[in-house]
Image (tube, rainbow, N blue to C red):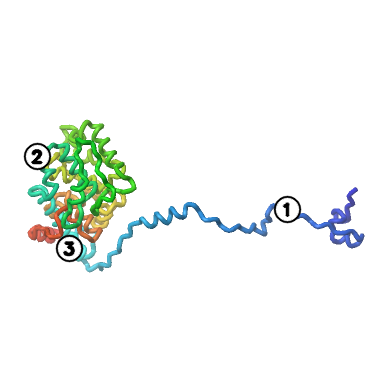
Amino acid sequence: MPQFCRHNRLVQNCPICSREQSVELRPLVSSSTPRVAEPRERAPRAPSRREPRRASAAAGVTVRRLRNTVDDGYRSPLLPGVKSSEEAARLGSELAFSATRLGILSEDPPGLYAEVAEGSGDIEERTWLAFLIAYLALLETEAPFSAISAVRTSWHSGELPDLDGVATGPRSAHDPDRGTRTIDAYRAWAARAGSQAAAFAGEGAWSPERRFARVFERLALPGLHRDARFELLVSLGTLGVYELRPDSLQLGGSDQVTVAAKRALGIGDPLLLGRRANELVAACGIPLAALDLAFYNWESAERATGGLGAAVEADPALIDAIESALGI
C-alpha cells in the first residue's frame, strides 16, 4: 500500500523522507498544461496566405504627390480652401479651358463627337458611340479618337467591342480584368428600358436637371465610375442628343473631382459643397459642368484635354474674367 510521510506526500515523492528512509526518489511527470509563470514558447509563424494579397493591393494604390505651394496670403470667398495665388491661378486656367471645351463641343465638335452630334443619324448609334467615348476615354495624343475608332461596333449588331489590349484615356472606366462586363451591364440596362433613347429620356415631364440627376443615379452600373457617368451625360447634353443639364456635380467618394472640390471649396458637407460650387460658376460666368474637368485637371496637375489636344488654348477673355472674379 502507498505510504505517506509526515509531509503528507508519498514517501517516494518526498525529497526529505526518501533520503531518511533510503527510498529512491521517483521522477515527477510534469503536466502538459503550460504554467502561467512560464508562457508557452511560440512556434515559428507560418507565412500567411493573405500576405501576397496585401502586397498586390499595395501595388495598385494610387499615390498623389503633395503640393509644395506656400501660403502667400491669397484669400477669396469663392475658394475658401485655397491659400496660394499660384494654385488659384492654375485652377482659374483649368476653369477657363474646361468652359472653352464645352463651347467647342456645342458649336464645332471634333472627331467622333461630330458624329454623336449629327442629328440625322440613328439616335441609338449616336448614344452608343457617346457611351464608348466616355467609358474608354479619349487619348492624350495627336489622335485622341483612334483607339475608340479601332474597337467601336454597331449598337444594332449586338456585337461587343474587342477590348483586349485597347488603349484608354486618363479618365477611363475600363478595367482589363473586367473584360466587357461593364458593357454587358450597360446593354442590359438599356434593354430593360426598351432602348437607350428611352433610358436616357426618362419621363417627358422631367426638366433637364431632373433628367440628369435621375439618369446619373440609374447609371450606377458595375465598373462605371462617377467620372465616366458624368462625362457621358454632359457630352450627350452638350452635343444635343438629349436634354440633360447638371445642377449638381454629383460628388461623393474618393475620386479626384470630389477631393479637389473639397480642397478648393474648403468644406466636406455635400450640401454646402453644392452651394459653393454654384456660387463659383455664377461669379466666373461658366456652366456648372465645366467644374468637372477643371477640378480633375487641377487635382491631377496634368491637363486632360478631352479630345481637343494640347494645341487648343482657353479663350483669353474668359481667362481674364475668371481671374478677375477670383481676385488673382
Q: CA distance from mark 2 to mark 1?
A: 89 Å
Residue 328 marker: none
Give the image location of residue 272, x and y in percent. Answer: 25, 49
Give the image location of residue 165, x and y in percent. Answer: 28, 51
Q: Nearer the viewer, residue 256 or 4?
A: 256
Dot 3: element: helix
Amino acid carrying mark 1 in the image: Ser
Q: Which residue is mark 3?
A: 89
In the displayed structure, 184 sits above or below 103; it is above
Contact flag, marks 2 and 1 (Cβ < 8 Å): no
Q: Which residue is mark 1?
A: 31
In the displayed structure, 226 sits above or below 96; it is above
Amino acid carrying mark 2 in the image: Gly
Q: Which residue is mark 2?
A: 119
Amino acid carrying mark 3 in the image: Ala
Dot 2: element: loop
Dot placed on the residue nearer the N-terminal end, 2 or 1: 1
